[in-house]
Each structure stands twice: as C-alpha cells, then as structure tokens.
Amino acid sequence: MIESIHTLPPATFTKKRNLSFSGQNKTEKKNYYPAISSLFIPGSGQMLNGESSKGIKIFASALGLEYMANKLLKSCHISSILDKADPKILLKTEKLALKSKSLAGFTALAGFIGLTLYSVINAFKYNDKDSKNPRNTGESIASYILPGIGQMLNGQVLKGLGLFTGSMATALIAAKFALTGNIIAARKAFFATGVISLYSAVDAYKTPKS
C-alpha cells in the first residue's frame, strides 16, 4: 500500500492542488460597501455596482411602499386614538375599514423590509469580475456626506462645484420652508437634496480618477 502511494506520478498531486486553487478562484467577490449602502437606501448598492436601471426600480418601489405604509399606519393610529377616546365615534363599517387599512399598511411595511433585504443581499453577492468600473469607496462616502467632494477628489472640479452648489441651495431652501412652517415644501426640497447626494456618491464611486 505504502509502495503504491510512493509510485504515484507527481502530476497527480499537481492536478489535485490546481483543482483546489481553481475552486478558490471561483469565489465571488463580496461587495461590503454597496450592501451597506443598500441597507440605508434600497437600490443604491445596485447603482454602485453599475446596475443603474435595476437600482432605480428598487429605489422607486421601496419609496412607494414606505410612503404607502407610513400614510396608512398614520391614518389608523389617529383613528384608533379617536376610537379609544369615544368608542361610539366610529361606526362598525368605519372600524372594519380601519382594520383593512391597518392590514394594508403592515403589508406595505413588510414589502418594504423584504425589498430592502433583497437589495442588500443582491448588492453583496454581485460579481463584478467583468466590470471595468473603478471602486472609489472613500470618494463616494465623502460625496454622500458632502455632495461634490468626491468629484473634486477624482479631478472633476467643475462638476463637483456644481453638485456642491446645487445641494447647498436645496438644503437652504428646505431649511427656509421648514422655519416658515411650510412642511410639504420643505420635505420636497430635502428630498431633492437627498437625490443630489445619492447621485454624487454613485458617480464618485464609478468615475475613474483623472
């Protein structure tokens, strides 16, 4: 038995070692930053990985589900407070409608959570071995916190200044509306600021340094 092992040709051991190494090379690269980004903003991880169309669809769907859940559950909360204060204030049909709204609200919330988890897992498992896009993680984080900074670090000074100016303008407009009590307009302006920040982060992450 020992003699048969010693008589095996060296090529046999070489082949086995090559197979083990080839198995390691097939391991997909894990994308921690896009996954973390998707946890906070569903779809942003896909955008960072170069799947812009998929990321926009996930982001829009998640935004719609979040808005629906927030509106329905808030309405149910107000109605339940009124019902506790005076049980006779709501009719039986209104109470039934309240239960239906509550169920729909929790369904939308569950859909939002599920979509967020899908976005995180999908961004984490994305295999970018064929992608030629750079991975500027530091510049992307800087641009998300302060839009335009990542572009400046990548050598796109004019583009960076434009994004910085735009984000500052929308932020100031939002603050002005909030101070005057115009909450709806303030939310719209803050949303515009968030969109600029997200675009700046994705663009800085994927743009090669010049």
Image (spheres, grey):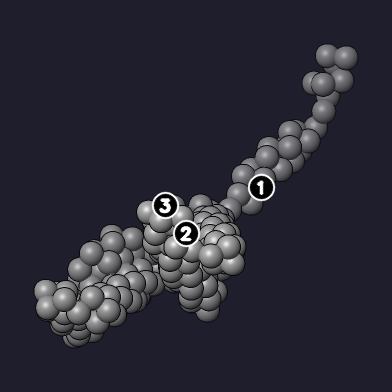
Instruction: Rate crowding at label 2 as few (under 14), some (14 to 19) or many (20 or more) other CA atoms within 10 Å.
Output: few
Residue 40's place in the image compared with 14, above or below, is below
Instruction: Rate crowding at label 3 as few (under 14), some (14 to 19) or many (20 or more) other CA atoms within 10 Å.
Output: few
Foreground of the two, 59 or 53: 59
Q: CA distance from mark 1 to mark 3?
A: 66 Å
Which residue is tagged 1?
Answer: 22
Q: Are marks 2 and 3 in contact (CB under 8 Å)?
A: no
Q: Position of residue 124 (x, y in %)?
A: 51, 55
Pair 2/3: label in front:
2
Q: CA distance from mark 1 to mark 2?
A: 72 Å
Which residue is tagged 2?
Answer: 88
Residue type highlighted by circle 1: Ser
Residue at the spot 37% in from the left edge and 54% down from the top edge: 85
Q: Secondary structure at mark 2?
A: loop
Looking at the image, residue 97 sits to the left or right of residue 68; the answer is right
Q: Position of residue 71 (x, y in %)?
A: 43, 68
Residue farthest to the front? 88
Looking at the image, residue 165 sits to the left or right of residue 62; the answer is left
Residue 84: numbered disc: 3
Pair 1/3: label in front:
3
Residue type highlighted by circle 3: Lys
Q: Position of residue 149 (x, y in %)?
A: 20, 71
Q: Is residue 112 visible?
A: no
Residue at the spot 48% in from the left edge and 73% down from the top edge: 64
Pair 1/2: label in front:
2
Residue type highlighted by circle 2: Lys
Q: Secondary structure at mark 1?
A: helix
Residue 138's place in the image compared with 26, above or below, is below
Q: Secondary structure at mark 3?
A: helix
Residue at the spot 53% in from the left edge and 76% down from the top edge: 57
